[in-house]
């Protein structure tokens, strides 16, 4: 969460003329400038892991992680399976709307646009708990017949669910998120989330390091600019231990 400290550490790594950098992509101008201008000047390859940024904006060599567009599609298909082909869905995301969130939203809309009786409402908020609660309150006041919620950014889910539960019972609603937040698995086990996209962080790390070594040794040139996607799966509350 300390973005300033995060960027300073990347800059320190570049100034130290390291051989390569594996980093969780940050969709900000500051990060893109460090990657596209400063790292490129020193010839330091950057591989984004877990969160991507557009290659044109960052000149990163490749991306290793989940296919976020596919993850959005999987959430939407599970939602249709649980809710049916009509209803109103609140999609709640961070007001910064980083690249990975836009990809998830695009995947959700790609599926739901074929179902005209499913309406979506996008709600922006910040990570701050009180802001998430206020955004959830406002959305439920405007749309009293809401059927489902999707936390496009997983750190929003806990406060969103807390406010839903304060106003009414959680059970009638279909609620979905992703496993980026450490609280997501607990919410799924408690039955407060109906479904969650599980990712493969260990595989991301392993493949990221292997791709970097291959690049530095000249064994894989060029790397696949589209990225190397790791496994994702839909975990459902009904299957939780």
Image (cartoon, helix red, strand yellow):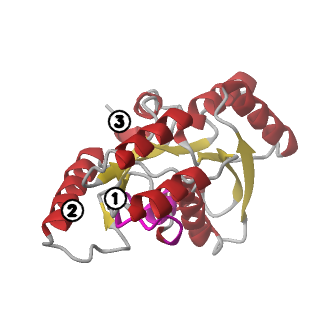
- Report the Cα–Cα distance between label 3 and label 1: 34 Å
Direction right: furthest residue: 142
* Residue 232 x, y percent position in the rendering: 34, 55
Question: Which residues, given as a range, are shown in magenta?
Answer: 56-75
Q: Secondary structure at mark 1?
A: strand
Q: Nearer the viewer, residue 173 or 104?
A: 104
Q: Nearer the viewer, mark 2 or mark 3?
A: 2
The Cα–Cα distance between marks 2 and 1, rounded to whole angstroms, is: 9 Å
Residue 211, numbered label = 2
Residue 173 appears at what percent x and percent y? 63, 41
Residue 64 on the magenta span: yes
According to the picture, the residue beneath numbered tag 1 turns out to be 47
Residue 107 lies in quadrant: bottom right
Measuring from the top left, give residue 34's x and y in whole percent.
Answer: 49, 54
Residue 169 painted magenta = no
Nearest the viewer among 214 and 206 is 214
The label shown at residue 240 is: 3
**Is there any visible trace of residue 196 in the rendered image?**
yes
Check whether the beta carbons of the residues at disc 2 and disc 1 lie within 8 A of each other. Answer: yes
Residue shown at the point (69%, 30%) measured from the top left:
164
Q: Residue at the far top: name it.
A: 166
Q: Is residue 48 left or right of residue 176?
A: left
Residue 171 higher or lower than 16, as above or below: above
Decide which of tag 2 and tag 3 comes sooner along the chain: 2
């Amino acid at each position: 969460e300390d973005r300033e400290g995060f960027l300073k550490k990347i800059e320190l790594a570049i100034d130290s003329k390291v051989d390569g950098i594996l980093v969780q992509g940050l969709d900000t101008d500051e990060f893109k400038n460090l990657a596209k201008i400063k790292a490129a000047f020193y010839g330091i390859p950057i591989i984004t892991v877990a969160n991507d940024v557009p290659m044109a904006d960052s000149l990163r060599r490749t991306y290793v992680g989940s296919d976020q567009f596919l993850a959005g599609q999987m959430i939407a298909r599970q939602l249709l399976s649980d809710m049916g082909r009509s209803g109103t869905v609140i999609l709640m995301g961070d007001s910064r709307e980083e690249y990975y969130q836009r990809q998830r939203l695009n995947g959700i809309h790609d599926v739901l646009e074929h179902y005209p009786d499913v309406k979506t409402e996008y709600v922006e908020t910040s990570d701050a708990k009180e802001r998430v609660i206020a955004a959830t309150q406002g959305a439920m006041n405007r749309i009293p017949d809401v059927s489902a919620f999707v936390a496009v950014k997983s750190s929003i889910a806990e406060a969103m669910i807390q406010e839903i539960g304060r106003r009414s019972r959680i059970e009638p609603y279909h609620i979905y998120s992703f496993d980026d937040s450490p609280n997501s698995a607990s919410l799924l086990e408690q039955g407060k989330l109906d479904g969650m996209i599980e990712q493969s962080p260990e595989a991301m790390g392993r493949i990221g390091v292997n791709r970097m070594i291959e690049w530095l040794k000249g064994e894989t040139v060029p790397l696949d600019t589209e990225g190397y996607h790791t496994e994702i799966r839909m975990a459902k509350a009904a299957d939780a231990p």
